[in-house]
Image (spheres, grey):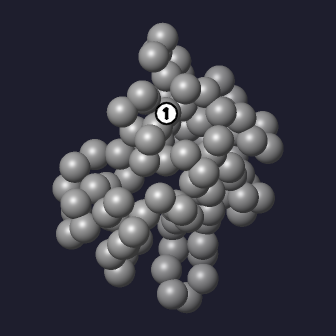
Amino acid sequence: MIQVTDKAKERIQVLLKEEGRTTNHNIRVSVKGGGCSGLMYDLDFDEKINPSDQVFEDKGVKILVDKKSLLYLLGTTLDFSDGLNGKGFQFINPNASRTCGCGESFAV
């Protein structure tokens, strides 16, 4: 399961409205090679649900994860911070053994 905090949900709703997208858009979360720790998170809107996608829903937000990324993301919480120390989406991932300072890459 992937969870979404209230702050992340609010920010997703704002972005949908700002970008003129409908509520039919889902959030696609995936993991790709790269970054200073070896793996990077990728977050985007997506209307299409692929047959091999795992679909999670939390607080009314549908999250799509491909099979390859699922092992890295199980148990992850998507959060949003707009504080002085950083602004943007953050992944609280219990599978990550190491993360970089920017929070965008990790290792398992």
Residue under numbered circle 1: 65
Q: Residue at x 65, y 24 (%)?
A: 24
Residue 76, how many percent across, how many down?
A: 57, 54
State the image coordinates of residue 45 (x, y, percent, origin top left): 50, 36
Picture residue at 61% right of the left edge, 65% below the top: 80
Q: Identify which residue, 36 or 15, lies in the foreground.
A: 36
Image x and y of residue 101, in percent: 35, 80
Q: Is residue 54 visible?
A: yes
Report the quarter where the N terminus lies.
top right
Looking at the rendered structure, the secondary structure element under dot 1 is strand
In the image, taking residue 108 as reference, residue 38 lies left or right, namely left
Residue at the extreme bottom: 84
Left/right of residue 100 with respect to residue 12 in the rendered view: left
Residue 97 vs 73, above or below: the answer is below
In depth, the one of 9 and 3 nearer the eye is 3
Which quadrant of the view contains residue 107? Answer: bottom left
Query: How crowded is the residue under tag 1: few (<14 C-alpha within 10 Å), some, or many (20+)?
Result: many
Q: Amino acid at mark 1?
A: Val
Residue 105 sits in quarter: bottom left
Instruction: Name, please, the residue furthest toward the top.
Output: 51
Residue visible at 35% across and 45% down in the picture:
31
Direction from residue 33 to residue 25 in the image, left or right: right
- In which quadrant of the rendered image does the C terminus lie? bottom left
Seen at 52% across and 61% down, the residue is 93
